[in-house]
């Protein structure tokens, strides 16, 4: 009877070891099932081929040129006034503190205006780009749901991926871009 108890203990131990081994190896086998299909998309390529991108770029170019022209006019006027003041100062041999303060104030206003304009340009660019990105994101999401992808990564951040995981052409087709 004693040998039977020893056999029973060994059998239980082996059964537990086998069960534990199966339990430990099972999650790694099913991890691929949990992850699902993973795809990649060349977001930059799609973005560049969108017709809306070209009009957004043109709008930004126009806005930048207008801002640049406005700031250049103000800067040229300030430089002319500074040069005229320096000539007058050299001719008279003395400066006018009030005029110097006024010129410094104008220079500071010009700097602030340039910073505000730059911030405005960044905001305008974000406003123009946001709808384009939303449209691309919607197409990617639609394809991901339709084809059973659980994750889609930008092609530029992947380390490795086969051609079958690239859905760029599907997104281009969905957006009617040739």
Image (cartoon, rainbow, N blue to C red):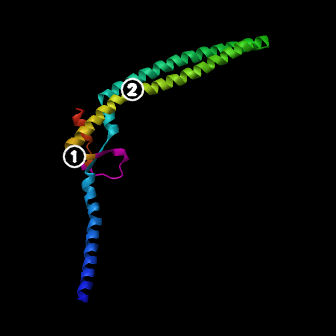
Which residue carries the number 2 mark? 127
Q: Using the image, determine if residue 105 lies above or below residue 163.
A: above
Instruction: Give me the C-alpha separation between circle 2 and circle 1.
Output: 32 Å
| Residue nearer the viewer, 23 or 61 | 23
- Closer to the chain start, of discs 2 and 1, is 2
Residue 156 in the magenta stretch? The answer is yes
| Residue nearer the viewer, 173 or 142 | 142
Q: Which residues are magenta?
A: 151-164
Rendered location of residue 153, percent (x, y): 32, 45
Question: What residue sits 66% from the left and 19% below the top?
Answer: 104
Question: What residue sits 24% from the left and 49% below the top?
Answer: 164
On the question of residue 123 being in view, the answer is yes
Q: Check disc 2 and report its element: helix, strand or loop.
A: helix
Rendered location of residue 71, percent (x, y): 54, 19
Res 28 quadrant in image: bottom left
How crowded pointer 2 is (Cα within 10 Å; few <14, some 14-19, many 20+) is rated as few
Q: Is residue 76 left or right of residue 123?
A: right
Q: Is residue 92 left or right of residue 8?
A: right
Circle on res. 50? none
Quadrant, the C terminus: top left
Question: What residue sits 37% from the left and 47% below the top?
Answer: 157
Quadrant, the N terminus: bottom left
Q: How many marks?
A: 2
Q: Residue lying at the far right in this picture: please name it.
A: 93
How crowded pointer 1 is (Cα within 10 Å; few <14, some 14-19, many 20+) is rated as few
| Residue nearer the viewer, 14 or 50 | 14
Rendered location of residue 58, percent (x, y): 38, 23
Question: What residue sits 67% from the left and 14% below the top?
Answer: 102
Rendered location of residue 145, percent (x, y): 22, 42
Circle on res. 148? 1
């Amino acid at each position: 009877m004693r040998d039977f108890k020893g056999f029973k203990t060994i059998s239980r131990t082996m059964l537990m070891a086998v069960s534990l081994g199966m339990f430990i190896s099972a999650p790694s086998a099913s991890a691929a099932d949990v992850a699902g299909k993973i795809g990649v998309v060349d977001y930059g390529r799609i973005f560049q081929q969108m017709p809306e991108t070209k009009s957004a770029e043109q709008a930004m170019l126009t806005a930048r040129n207008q801002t640049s022209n406005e700031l250049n006019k103000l800067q040229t006027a300030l430089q002319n006034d500074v040069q005229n003041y320096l000539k007058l100062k050299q001719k008279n041999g003395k400066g006018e503190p009030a005029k110097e303060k006024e010129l410094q104030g104008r220079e500071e206003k010009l700097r602030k205006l340039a910073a505000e304009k730059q911030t405005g340009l960044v905001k305008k660019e974000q406003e123009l780009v946001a709808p384009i990105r939303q449209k691309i994101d919607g197409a990617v999401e639609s394809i991901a749901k339709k084809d059973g992808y659980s994750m889609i990564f930008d092609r530029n951040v992947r380390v490795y991926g086969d051609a079958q995981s690239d859905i760029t052409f599907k997104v281009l087709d969905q957006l009617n871009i040739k």
